[in-house]
Image (cartoon, rainbow, N blue to C red):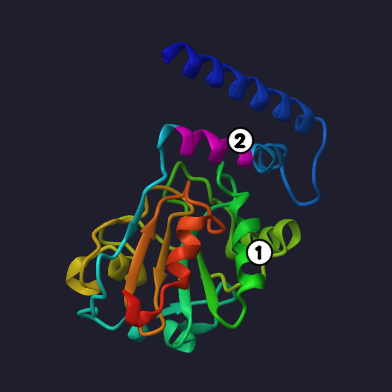
Amino acid sequence: MKSVLKIKWVLVLLAVTTIAWACASSKTQGMSTRQQILKSVYPVLTGVTRFFGVNSRSIPAQQAVSPVVPVYNIPFELIDGTPASLSAYKGKKIVVVNTASDCGYTGQYEELQKLYTDRKGEVVIVGFPANDFKQQEKGSNEEIAGFCKKNYGVEFPLATKAVVVKGKEQHPIFKWLSDPDQNGWNKEAPAWNFSKYIIDEHGKLIGYFDPGVSPLGAEFQKNLDTKPDQQ
């Protein structure tokens, strides 16, 4: 068994090296060489992490739990500085995700945009760019917005850069998402860039998902399809 795992790991590394070499000589408009490489290896990365069970947890709520603090009352700013709140999305599933432009999971922007397009009217996605993990989001709000639009066609709402990890500077929405005294049950803060949370049509948190869980995957889709009265 160990030898099989080693062979698979070697093949994965060879694939990553080949893709990286191929991408190093080209540069997509608006993307650095590093970002182009990361975009190319994203499918390999997610396959490897799922195979080894890294960053691949799905933690759905065991039952519907009413939040102690209403999430709809928490304000935030869109990436252009416009005041906003999640109350604008009542009646829809809300996916909240912390994002970054220089991460191995950055290619997930493409999957998130597909989800947003395919389920428009049912699901809204709100991305929160964050520089908390290995400083992989150093750009300004304007640079981030341009990068996402140009390279991934992102149309879903993006917030201004925020701190998402636990601490004094944690954004209030991520404080709510990771504090059971506010959301009613979940304590998980983002494990890395592109951690995802689903809030149901009535403002109840119904799941946390690690970065390696695809927003187009069966487990994630199952939770999006859950009706409020089925939780």
Which element is circle 1 on?
helix
Furthest residue in direction left, as rendered: 181
From the image, tell me which residue sits under label 1.
114
| Segment colored magenta | 42-51
Question: Residue 33 appears at what percent x and percent y?
Answer: 72, 37
Question: Residue 226 appears at what percent x and percent y?
Answer: 41, 73
Q: What residue do we see at 53% from left, 55% from top?
A: 217
Q: Quadrant of the C terminus?
A: bottom left
Question: Residue 143 appears at what percent x and percent y?
Answer: 65, 60
| Label whose residue precedes the other's in the sequence (1 or 2) | 2
From the image, tell me which residue sits under label 2.
44
Q: Amino acid at mark 1?
A: Lys
Asked if one can make out residue 36 in the rendered structure from this viewpoint, the answer is yes
Vertical order, 34 against 110 (above or below): above
CA separation in Å, label 1 and label 2:
19 Å
Asked if one can make out residue 129 in the rendered structure from this viewpoint, the answer is no
Q: What residue do we see at 49% from left, 84% from top?
A: 83
| Magenta stretch: includes residue 47 | yes
Is 150 displayed left or right of 204 in the figure?
right
Question: Residue 195 appears at what percent x and percent y?
Answer: 43, 55
Residue nearer the viewer, 39 or 164:
39
Is 11 displayed left or right of 165 in the figure?
right
Q: What residue do we see at 55% from left, 21% from top?
A: 8
Q: Amino acid at mark 2?
A: Val
How many numbered marks are there?
2
Furthest residue in direction top, as rendered: 3
Residue nearer the viewer, 86 or 48:
48
Q: Quadrant of the N terminus?
A: top left
